[in-house]
């Protein structure tokens, strides 16, 4: 064997060993994380009032919300994902109890958030149990959400009344399309998918800047679809890139590619990923500051929820790409998972109100939920752990 061949063989052996070692380390980390989640949520279960959903933790007290709040599906959804990995019957009991509480949301049409509320919860419940009653509830919810589609603007109206907006569509709304397309492809009306596709196309046309960062709110004339203004509600400024919004965009287009296999959605997701991962303000631990354009970076809060959403989305994008590109998505997601599992972001058992993660930011300009645990950070973190375990 020539020296060159020996080198190639040695290199291949080393890469296999390295890959196996890496796989083992990650699978241990993920197993530990689900065991921790089981114990930590057992603590949370015992502090949640019967008719409310846990949202955050502030000044030593659990913050809860009514079931019509956009986050009401994340607690049941997180419980289902923990149950799936641990088979703990107490966790399942709480998951079933909380599903029942939010069931009445299935006819809720006052805003666009029904996908978050009913698919993150019932979607996971159905995926895990295949109980047809859960599917019925998802189909009804998708129909309710579709009533918010406004043909004049070819998009789903996000809010009825908010600030001075006339026809607001926020980038977050991309996430609600998952329930529509899933329902359409699983026994629901074909129109549901058409609505989702129209919304995704309109958003692709109007929500993005040339660098593929996203505006938060596009305000439309509801009748003509004319763009009236490009604004923010939760970001630093109208022209800034609010971190969680970039996460919603990345997740949204990756998910739309999953269902439709429309290449334009894949390319959009790849470009959004580039914006996020090449952003000079993205720290080494890959947990973004709350807004990529806050001029006070690094002296501003992080947003662990944005990191969890981005990690989960990147892991899916890795499924549709190959080579160095795939590697960069998976490596970045892995770094996010490792950071979120570490001391800086993860709570200690029995602390932080029973939530898994610290340091998320809900609405900094609204002076709301700054540097706190948030239920949806936990949800997307658990989803990222599951995706890593299943796919890599
Ligand atoms: N969908 C609301 C938020 O991301 O804060």
Image (cartoon, rainbow, N blue to C red):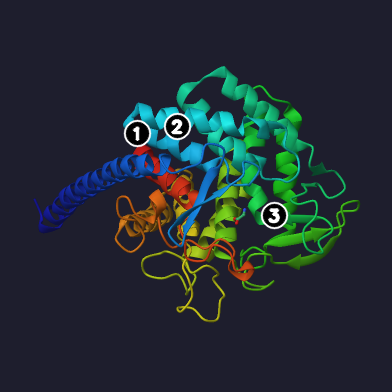
Q: Secondary structure at mark 2?
A: helix
Q: Which residue is mark 3?
A: 204
Where residue 227 appears, x then y in whole percent?
83, 61
Query: Which mark is nearer the camera, 3 or 2?
Result: 2
Judged from this view, the residue extending furthest toward the right is 223
Circle nearer the N terminus (3, 2): 2
Circle nearer the N terminus (1, 2): 1
Q: Is residue 112 left or right of residue 317?
A: right
Q: Which residue is mark 2?
A: 94
CA gap, disc 1 and disc 3 = 36 Å
Q: Picture quarter containing residue 178?
A: top right
The crowding category of the residue bearing disc 2, from other C-alpha atoms within 10 Å (few below 14, some 14 to 19, many at least 20), is many
Circle nearer the N terminus (1, 3): 1
CA gap, disc 1 and disc 2 = 15 Å
| Residue for point 43% across, 59% down | 60
State the mark number for residue 85.
1
Q: Nearer the viewer, residue 343 or 184?
A: 343
């Amino acid at each position: 064997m020539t020296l060159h061949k020996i080198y190639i063989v040695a290199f291949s052996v080393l890469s296999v060993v390295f890959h196996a070692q890496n796989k083992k380390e990650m699978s241990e980390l993920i197993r530990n994380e689900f065991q921790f989640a089981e114990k930590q949520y057992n603590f949370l279960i015992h502090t949640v009032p019967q008719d409310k959903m846990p949202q955050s933790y502030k000044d030593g007290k659990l913050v809860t919300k009514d079931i019509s709040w956009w986050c009401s599906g994340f607690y049941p959804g997180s419980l289902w994902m923990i149950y799936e990995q641990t088979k703990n019957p107490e966790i399942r009991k709480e998951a079933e109890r909380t599903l029942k509480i939010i069931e009445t949301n299935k006819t809720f049409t006052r805003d666009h958030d029904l996908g978050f509320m009913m698919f993150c919860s019932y979607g996971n419940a159905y995926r895990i149990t295949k109980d047809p009653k859960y599917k019925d509830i998802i189909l009804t919810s998708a129909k309710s959400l579709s009533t918010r589609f406004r043909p004049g603007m070819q998009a789903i109206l996000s809010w009825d009344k908010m600030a001075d907006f006339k026809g607001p569509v926020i980038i977050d709304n991309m996430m609600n399309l998952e329930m529509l397309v899933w329902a359409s492809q699983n026994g629901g009306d074909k129109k549901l998918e058409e609505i989702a596709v129209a919304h995704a196309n309109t958003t692709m046309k109007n929500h993005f800047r040339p660098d593929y960062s996203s505006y938060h709110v596009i305000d439309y004339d509801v009748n003509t679809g004319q763009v009236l203004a490009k604004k923010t509600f939760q970001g630093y400024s109208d022209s800034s890139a609010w971190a969680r919004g970039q996460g919603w965009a990345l997740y949204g287009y990756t998910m739309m590619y999953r269902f439709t296999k429309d290449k334009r959605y894949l390319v959009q997701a790849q470009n959004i990923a580039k914006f996020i991962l090449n952003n000079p303000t993205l720290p080494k631990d890959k947990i973004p500051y709350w807004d990529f354009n806050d001029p006070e970076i690094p002296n501003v809060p992080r947003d662990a929820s944005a990191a969890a959403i981005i990690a989960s989305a990147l892991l899916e994008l890795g499924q549709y790409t190959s080579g160095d590109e795939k590697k960069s998505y998976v490596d970045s997601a892995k770094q996010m998972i490792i950071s979120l599992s570490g001391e800086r972001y993860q709570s200690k058992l029995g602390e932080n109100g029973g939530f898994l993660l610290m340091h998320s930011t809900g609405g900094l300009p609204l002076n709301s939920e700054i540097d706190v645990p948030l239920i949806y950070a936990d949800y997307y973190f658990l989803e990222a752990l599951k995706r890593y375990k299943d796919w890599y």
